[in-house]
Structures are given as structure tokens and as C-alpha cells.
Amino acid sequence: MNLKNSPMHYGFIAKCFHWGTALLFLAAYVSVYYRQWFTEAKTPENWTALQLHLSIGVSLGVIVVLRVIWRKMNETPQPEPGTKLEHLAAHMGHYALYGVMIIMPLTGYLGTGVNTEFFFLFDVPKFEDTWLFTVVVQDFMGLSFKTFEAPIDFIHKDIFGAWLVWLLILGHVLAALYHHFGKGDRTIKKMTTGKP
Ligand code: HEM
Ligand code: HEM
């Protein structure tokens, strides 16, 4: 099994990044909606679900940095035959997904008023307690945390969390299924078995 990508398929590490990220995205959604729909405010379950969401989100933030570095160190497998427009759409879609993978953890972290108890192992201090907040947001921009947090929360929850992320992932999955079942090409195989 190749660790690195080849012209024919993604390597083991890129596959782990891809499917690990997909699972963690699902877990981030399950934890936050479990909290909102199935727990009462101020109960231990409510806090645990929130902390799981924060821990998963922070993990995704770290993983995306490693993933981008790994991508830069590797060739990208050759695209399947298609029109220029299809290739452009695939590129844009992948860039947008990388954007989401960066924006969601970033806005989540910047807009959260509690520490992340990282899987209950150690604390990651909240942004409000960092020197960056004091120097940039408080002193330079002259904003309180409440004023700073409001638009960031809106992006995290209402624009991206509730809509954009779902739409992008849905489009991405439909495109993958269309390649596999509609065009019968190797797009899904490149990210799974790697078989011809
Ligand atoms: C890729 C990573 C992430 C995804 C996909 C994600 C997704 C979401 C979604 C869908 C919501 C609920 C939106 C709604 O109320 O309708 C939410 C809420 C929230 N997120 Fe994230 N998030 C991520 C990372 C983070 C991170 C890193 C943090 C903080 C360290 C964070 C903190 C929060 C908080 C505090 C809420 C509000 C929880 C509540 O009101 O129940 N998120 N997130
Ligand atoms: C069941 C869910 C998913 C399926 C079936 C799937 C399928 C695929 C396939 C087949 C490829 C290879 C495309 C190509 O080479 O042209 C791919 C690439 C990619 N996927 Fe997914 N994916 C899923 C979920 C996700 C999620 C949740 C994300 C991120 C939030 C994501 C982000 C990406 C990115 C960024 C690439 C481009 C990789 C690169 O070239 O660096 N995928 N996906």
C-alpha cells in the first residue's frame, strides 16, 4: 500500500485524512444537534455534548493544517476524462471544501466563550483569554468579546453550519456518485480501493 499519492490513486495517508475528516464532520454535527435537541440546558449531558463538539472541532482545525501540508508535498492523482467545465467545477468544489474545513473550526474557536476541555484531557484556552484577543480585538479594534463574537457566531452557525456546509457536502457526494454510477469512471476508486 502506497503512503503517498500516485497518478492513479490517492495514497493511504490522503485517504485517512479524507475519510477521517468526513467522519469527524459527521461527529461534529451529531454532537451539537444532540446537545440542542436531546439535552436540557445546564445538565452534565449538555456540557459533555458541547465539549465533545468543541474537541472534535479543534481536532479538525489541527487536521486540516496537516492535510494541507501533506497535499502540498504530494502530486494529485490525474483527473478522469471530462470537459474543461467539469474539471473546473471539481477544482472549485474541492477548494470550497478546504475553505469550509478551515472556516468552521476557526469561527467556532474564535466565537466560543468557554475553554475547550479537549476530550476531558487538558484545557485549550478560549480565544478571549489569549494575548491575540487583547492586542488585536480589544486594544486595536476596540471591541468587547460580545460585539466581536456576534458576526462570527452568525457565520459559524447560521450561514455555514446550517446551510453552506450541507450544500457543499451534498454536491460533493452527488458528484462522486454521478462519476461512479453515471460515468462509470475511477473517481471513487481513487479515494477507496485504488483498483483499476
Ligand atoms: C469543522 C468543525 C465544526 C463544525 C462542522 C461545526 C458545526 C456547528 C454547527 C452545525 C452548529 C450548530 C448551528 C446551529 O445552532 O444551528 C455549531 C454550533 C457551535 N459550535 Fe461548531 N462546528 C465546528 C467547530 C467548532 C469549534 C472548533 C468550536 C469551538 C472551539 C465550535 C463551537 C461551537 C459552539 C459554541 C456552538 C454553539 C452550540 C450551541 O449553541 O448548542 N465549533 N457548530
Ligand atoms: C460520503 C461522503 C464523501 C464521499 C463519497 C467523498 C468522495 C470523494 C472522492 C471520490 C474524492 C476524489 C475526487 C477526485 O479525485 O476528483 C474526494 C475528494 C475530496 N473530498 Fe470527499 N467525499 C465525501 C466526504 C467529504 C467531506 C465531508 C469532505 C470535507 C468536508 C470532503 C472533502 C474532499 C476534498 C477536499 C477532496 C479533494 C482532495 C484533494 O485532492 O486534495 N469529502 N471525495
Image: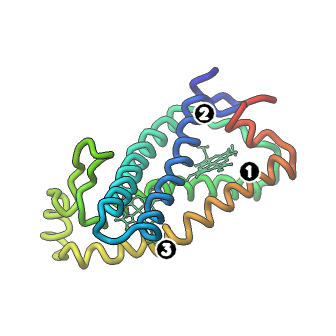
Amino acid at the residue labelled 3: Ile
Label 2–label 1 contact, CB within 8 A: no
For the point 56% across and 68% down, the residue is: 164
Q: Please tell me whether mark 3 or mark 2 is closer to you in this view.
A: 3
In front: 149, or 36?
36
Against 146, is 127 above or below? above
Q: Which residue is mark 2?
A: 75
- At mark 2, the secondary structure is loop
- Residue depth check, mark 2 versus mark 1: number of the one nearer the observer: 1
147 vs 79: above or below: below
- The residue type indicated by label 1 comes to Ala
For label 2, the crowd category at 10 Å Cα-Cα, with few meaning under 14, some 14 to 19 and many 20 or more, is few
In the rendered view of the protein, which quadrant contains the C terminus? top right
Q: Is the CB–ligand 2 distance for label 1 below 8 Å?
A: yes
Q: Residues within 10 Å of mark 3 (few under 14, many from 20)?
A: few
Instruction: Say which of 150 and 53 sits in front.
Output: 53
Give the image quarter of residue 85. bottom right
Nearest the eye: 103 or 141: 103
Camera-side residue of 42 and 57: 42
User: Which tag, 2 or 1, sits closer to the chain's start?
Assistant: 2
Give the mark nearer the N terminus: 3 vs 2. 2
Q: How many marks?
A: 3
Q: Which residue is mark 3?
A: 159
Q: Position of residue 76 (x, y in %)?
A: 63, 37
Residue drawn where x is 23% and y is 76% of the image:
146
Task: From the viewer's perspective, tell me whether residue 134 is left or right of residue 184.
Answer: left
What quarter of the picture does the N terminus occupy?
top right
How far apart, in angstroms, are the residues tagged by discs 2 and 1?
20 Å
Question: Marks 1 and 3, Cα distance to the nearest angstrom?
Answer: 24 Å
Q: Which residue is mark 1?
A: 176
Is 62 left or right of 116, judged from the image as shown? right
